[in-house]
Amino acid sequence: MTGQEVAYIRVSTIEQNTESQRAILSKIKIDKVFEEKISGKNAKRPELQAMLDYVRAGDTVYVKDLSRLARNTKDLLNIVEYLTNKGVTLKSIKENIDTSTNFGKLMITFLAAIYEFERANLLERQRDGIAVAKMQGKYKGRKQVARPANFDEVYRKWQKREIKSSVAIRELNISEYAFYKFVRNSQTEAREKGCANG
C-alpha cells in the first residue's frame, strides 16, 4: 500500500490568505490538507500536531517552504526527526528539499550543524553572562523544573530505544538540560534501590 500525500499550510495571522501556498501545492495530488492561521513561534499549533499524529510510515508531507513548519532551527530539526522516526518523508518545494534523498539528508545535516554552532555560541554567551553576574553578586542560579507526571513512562520508552531523546524531550515539554538531569536522578535511584535489595 502506497503512502498518502499530505500538505501542511500555515500563515501567521487571520488576515493573511493561504492561496499562494495552495496554488503551489495544487500541482501535487494531495490526499489531505492541514491548514491553520497561527504564528510559527507557537510550537503547540493544533493543525501541526494533528498532522504529526495523522501521518504514517510511507506518507509524504509537503510544505511550500521550511518556515511554514517552524520559525527556528531547533523546532524544525525536532519535527524532521519526528517525521523520520515515523518513516515519513518531508518535501519542501521552495528549498527543493526531499528528506528521502541523499541531498535532502545532507541539507538537514547542514541545518543541524548550523544549529549546534548557534547553540554553542549562545551557551558561551550565557556562561560569560553568568560569570559577570556572579562577580556582581547577582546570579541566582538555574530555576528548578518540576518533574513531569509522565516522565517515568517516557523514560522507559527512551531506555528501550523506542524513541530518541529529542522526541522524549518534546513529549515532556522540558529542556534538554532538565531531561538529562531527571535521567541521572532516575539512574541514581535505580542503583540505590538495587544496592538496598542486594
Image (cartoon, grey):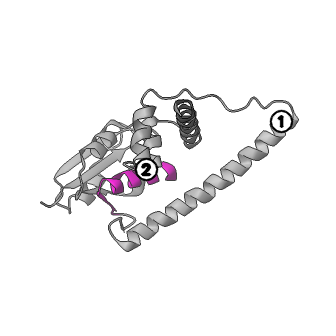
Label 2 secondary element:
loop
Regarding residue 71, the answer to whether it shows in the image is no
Q: Which residue is mark 1?
A: 134
Mark 1 Cα shell of 10 Å, populated few (<14), some (14-19), many (≥20) = few
Residue 44 shown left or right of residue 36 in the figure: right
In depth, the one of 59 and 183 nearer the eye is 183
Q: Quadrant of the N terminus?
A: bottom left
Position of residue 149 measured from the top left corner of the image (x, y, whole percent): 44, 26
Where residue 180 appears, x then y in whole percent?
Answer: 56, 42
Residue 140 sits in which quadrant? Answer: top right
Q: Which segment is the magenta one?
A: 72-93
- Choose between 149 and 104: the one closer to the eye: 149
User: Percent position (x, y) of residue 87?
Assistant: 29, 57
Location of mark 2 (residue): 164
Residue 115: numbered disc:
none
Lateral position of residue 5 relative to residue 113, left or right: left
